[in-house]
Image (tube, helix red, strand yellow):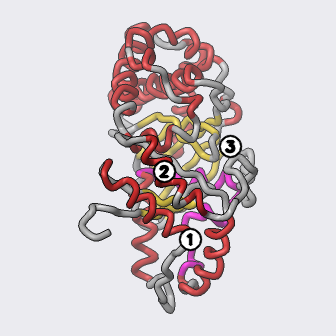
């Protein structure tokens, strides 16, 4: 398969292992064959120990850089009930060798549920033919819709969590607010519009008016399919205690008083452009197809059409349960 531009990248997702590959239309069948081989004919490289001290430190920095959010790493650890799969700093890596990995991972690769997603410019008929001779030829497994045999059991948290993080990253004060799981694409759009509005408000108050932080942000992050509204303010350690109260006051005023027509228009315009660009991105589709009911229709790619969502977004804002907010105060050791 040399010279065909095939590749495979392996990653660990919240409740799944993922192999990701890219190929041209002409080489799709070969890429599918390669991905299937990773599953049923994995090659185990013999290593006496997988991690050296410097590699462990680098793995931590890589996780921070990939997520672009030290707060998000800690939030996942807290709401997973300190499930070891989401521990921010896993010193146990230092004691793991390749034989232990193979004996644990091998049986999972042979029996676990499998889902194959393909997006991009390809022939569906050719893809189905390639899948039938590869993944379709494997022994039967449990359907993907079956319950995960290794569930993560989230816990309800609120109040203040003081966190001492090691290494690199930004000290920050974060308000994390759980949101209801959206029932459809319209509800999903309204949650994103809510975050866009709060992002504008944060930049105005925290950066322009108070000078607390140059890069405050608000966004929706998902963990175990549950949406969280994250308001993050990177700041110096000494400012952390003051920012939490300011954020809660900002949220209260936002919930009670809403926003102006101009604010909503400014929030909707970039979100519509992003939705339109996402629809052209195969990588976005790979993730979006996990929940097709949340994929925005083309009507929501138009910022004028998005203006019709203001009433629903305002209702969502009024329903924010601020008493359930979790405040993360993250300082570096």
Image label count:
3
Q: Residue at x 56, y 77 (%)?
A: 91
- Main structural element of the magenta stretch: helix, strand or loop? helix
The residues tagged by marks 1 and 3 sit, at their Cα atoms, a distance apart of 46 Å
Disc 2 vs disc 3: Cβ atoms closer than 8 Å?
Answer: no
Q: Label 2 neighbourhood size at 10 Å, few (<14), some (14-19), many (20+)?
A: few
Mark 1 or 3, closer to the camera: 1
Q: Earlier in the sequence, mark 2 or mark 3?
A: 2
**Residue 52 percent location from the top left of the image:** 44, 84
Which is nearer the N-term, disc 1 or disc 3?
1
Q: Is residue 92 magenta?
A: yes
Q: Which percent across, then down, holds residue 14?
A: 59, 55
Which residues make up the magenta segment? 68-93
Q: Which mark is residue 129?
A: 2
Residue 41 in view, yes or no: yes
> Looking at the image, is mark 2 or mark 3 nearer the viewer?
2
Mark 1, Cα crowd under 10 Å, few <14 / some 14-19 / many 20+, is some
Q: Is residue 195 rendered to the left or right of residue 153?
A: left
The foreground one among 106 and 128 is 128
Residue ID for mark 3: 159
As drawn, 284 above or below 89: above
């Amino acid at each position: 398969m040399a010279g065909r531009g095939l590749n495979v990248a392996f990653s660990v997702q919240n409740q799944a292992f993922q192999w990701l590959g890219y190929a041209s239309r002409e080489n799709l069948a070969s890429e599918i064959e390669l991905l299937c081989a990773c599953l049923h004919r994995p090659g185990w490289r013999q290593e006496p120990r997988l991690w050296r001290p410097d590699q462990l430190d680098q793995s931590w920095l890589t996780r921070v850089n990939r997520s672009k959010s030290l707060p998000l790493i800690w939030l996942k650890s807290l709401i997973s009930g300190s499930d070891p799969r989401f521990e921010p700093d896993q010193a146990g890596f230092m004691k793991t060798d390749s034989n232990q990995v193979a004996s644990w991972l091998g049986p999972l690769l042979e029996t676990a549920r499998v889902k194959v997603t393909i997006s991009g410019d390809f022939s569906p008929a050719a893809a189905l033919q390639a899948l039938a001779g590869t993944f379709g030829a494997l022994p039967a497994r449990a359907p993907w819709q079956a319950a995960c045999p290794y569930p993560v059991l989230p816990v309800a948290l609120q109040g203040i969590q003081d966190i001492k993080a090691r290494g690199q990253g930004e000290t920050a004060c974060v308000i994390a607010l759980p949101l209801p799981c959206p029932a459809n694409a319209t509800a999903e759009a309204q949650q994103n519009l809510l975050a866009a509005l709060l992002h504008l408000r944060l930049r105005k108050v925290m950066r322009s008016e108070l000078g607390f932080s140059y890069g405050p942000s608000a966004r929706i992050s998902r963990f175990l399919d549950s949406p969280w509204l994250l308001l993050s303010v990177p700041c110096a350690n000494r400012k952390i205690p003051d920012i939490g109260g300011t954020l809660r006051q900002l949220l209260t005023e936002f919930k009670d008083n809403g926003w102006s027509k101009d604010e909503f228009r400014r929030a909707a315009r970039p979100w519509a452009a992003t939705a339109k660009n996402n629809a052209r991105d195969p990588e976005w589709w790979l993730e979006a197809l996990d929940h097709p009911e949340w994929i925005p229709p083309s009507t929501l790619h138009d910022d004028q059409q998005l203006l019709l969502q203001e009433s629903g977004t305002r209702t969502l804002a009024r329903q924010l349960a601020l008493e359930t907010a979790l405040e993360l105060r993250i300082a570096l050791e």
